[in-house]
Image: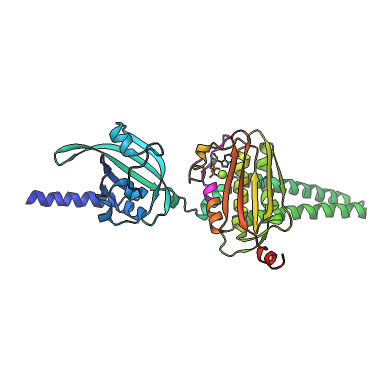
């Protein structure tokens, strides 16, 4: 009896231990049955522990009746137990009990466990919910644009230098006052100060917390302002930026969100053109929608990567810079918040176009007066 008690105690100890781990953990037998799981896994998939233990792994996390097709995903049970691998790290999607998909990163290892006197090969999986981890905090949104600061400082440096020159000239000119010249200096100084204010304004608007209050946004005004922050980045890689946005392209949205969206897509376009090229932002009205497109002449996206690019933390930039892989996750979240749709059209070696379809703010007015 003593040893039974000890056994129970160590069982409790083990469960408490794995329940304390913040990532989802499950142990799966070669027959795809889940032998053990922790509280974090149950929370991830929204199932009770009693439902999880003893169920089939592909039913529990993929909502399937049959094992996942091996050609589509790297299944740890197959890779470790059937093919004899030792470890596997991969990214995949899991489903909650109510059918919501989330991105995960899975690290798994093979263990040989003694079960009912027989040695059984099992896969131990550690499952991190990437969407949860990327629950894009304001800090992460800002880290995406943090690098802009250098370029923006440069943008402000130039006007400030002009102001300085203007003031010097005024000072030395004070003795021999020629009114016309003085007025000209004042004009330059005013102009450059307005430039500085506009640049800092754009940066502040961009870094405002994600807005819940929506307003009427004129894209022909917002887009150039947002793009003006990228001039330095673009110059560095020989990218020419242009925009063509008719006056009547208006949407209802959160100002800081839409700025963030434009900046993230444009930054990606710049990173995709390490040897220079043309970055073009356009908008047009179409059947009650506004289509906003960001097109580049960069390296393009391979068809097999199309699913990956929107994964949090997935980053493969064409220039040598290191990304955090959050830009498109942020874009996707913004698109969702605005009930908009995003599509990508890309040809390897030619370039990519990201298009977002928003509802036209003037649609109702248009319907009333066709
Ligand atoms: N315009 C583009 N052209 C080519 N590849 C792109 C483009 N936009 C995004 N990608 C690919 O998608 C990846 C993820 O983008 P993103 O989420 O913004 O992360 P990051 O920019 O930090 O790498 C990029 O690393 C790149 O491989
Ligand atoms: Mg990016």
Q: Residue at x 79, y 53 (%)?
A: 191
Q: Is residue 282 visible?
A: yes
Magenta stretch mostly in which secondary structure? loop
Residue in front for this viewpoint, 87 or 120: 120
Q: Measured from the top left, where is residue 216 in percent x and y?
A: 66, 63
Judge from the rendering whether residue 145 lies leftward or rightward of residue 280; answer left or right: left
Q: Measured from the top left, where is residue 205 in percent x and y?
A: 63, 57
Q: Residue at x 25, y 55 (%)?
A: 50
Q: Is residue 146 visible?
A: no
Quadrant in which ligand 2 is drawn:
top right
Is residue 121 magenta-colored?
Answer: no
Q: Quadrant of the C terminus?
A: bottom right
Residue range corresponding to the magenta coloring: 311-330
How many labels sit on residues? Answer: 0
Judge from the rendering whether residue 306 lies leftward or rightward of residue 273; answer left or right: left
* Outermost residue, bottom side: 368
Judge from the rendering whether residue 124 lies leftward or rightward of residue 89; answer left or right: left
């Amino acid at each position: 009896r003593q040893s039974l008690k000890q056994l129970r105690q160590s069982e409790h100890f083990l469960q408490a231990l794995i329940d304390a781990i913040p990532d989802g953990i499950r142990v799966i037998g070669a027959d795809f049955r889940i032998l053990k799981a922790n509280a974090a896994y149950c929370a991830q998939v929204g199932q009770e522990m009693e439902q999880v233990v003893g169920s089939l792994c592909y039913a529990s996390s993929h909502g399937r009746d049959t094992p996942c097709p091996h050609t589509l995903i790297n299944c740890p049970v197959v890779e470790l137990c059937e093919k004899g691998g030792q470890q596997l790290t991969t990214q995949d999607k899991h489903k909650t009990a109510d059918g919501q998909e989330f991105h995960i990163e899975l690290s798994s290892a093979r263990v040989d466990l003694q079960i009912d006197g027989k040695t059984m090969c099992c896969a131990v999986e550690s499952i991190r919910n990437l969407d949860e981890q990327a629950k894009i905090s304001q800090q992460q949104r800002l880290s995406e644009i943090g690098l802009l600061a250098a370029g923006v400082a440069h943008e402000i440096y130039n006007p400030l230098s002009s102001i300085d020159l203007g003031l010097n000239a005024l000072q030395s000119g004070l003795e021999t006052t020629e009114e016309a010249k003085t007025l000209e200096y004042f004009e330059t100084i005013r102009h450059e100060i307005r430039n500085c204010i506009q640049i800092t304004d754009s940066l502040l608007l961009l870094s405002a917390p994600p807005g819940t209050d929506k307003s009427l946004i004129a894209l022909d005004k917002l887009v150039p302002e947002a793009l003006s922050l990228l001039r330095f980045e673009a110059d560095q890689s020989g990218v020419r930026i242009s925009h063509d946005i008719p006056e009547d392209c208006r949407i209802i949205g959160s100002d800081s969100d839409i700025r963030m969206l434009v900046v993230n897509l444009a930054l990606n376009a710049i990173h995709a053109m390490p040897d220079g090229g043309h970055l073009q932002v356009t908008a047009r009205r179409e059947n009650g929608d506004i289509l906003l497109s960001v097109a580049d002449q960069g390296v393009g996206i391979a068809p097999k990567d199309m699913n990956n690019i929107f994964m949090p933390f997935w980053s493969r930039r064409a220039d040598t810079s290191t990304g955090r892989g959050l830009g498109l996750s942020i874009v996707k979240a913004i698109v969702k918040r605005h009930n908009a749709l995003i599509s990508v059209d890309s040809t390897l070696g030619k370039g990519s176009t990201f298009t977002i379809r928003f509802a036209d703010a003037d649609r109702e007015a248009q319907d009333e007066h066709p």
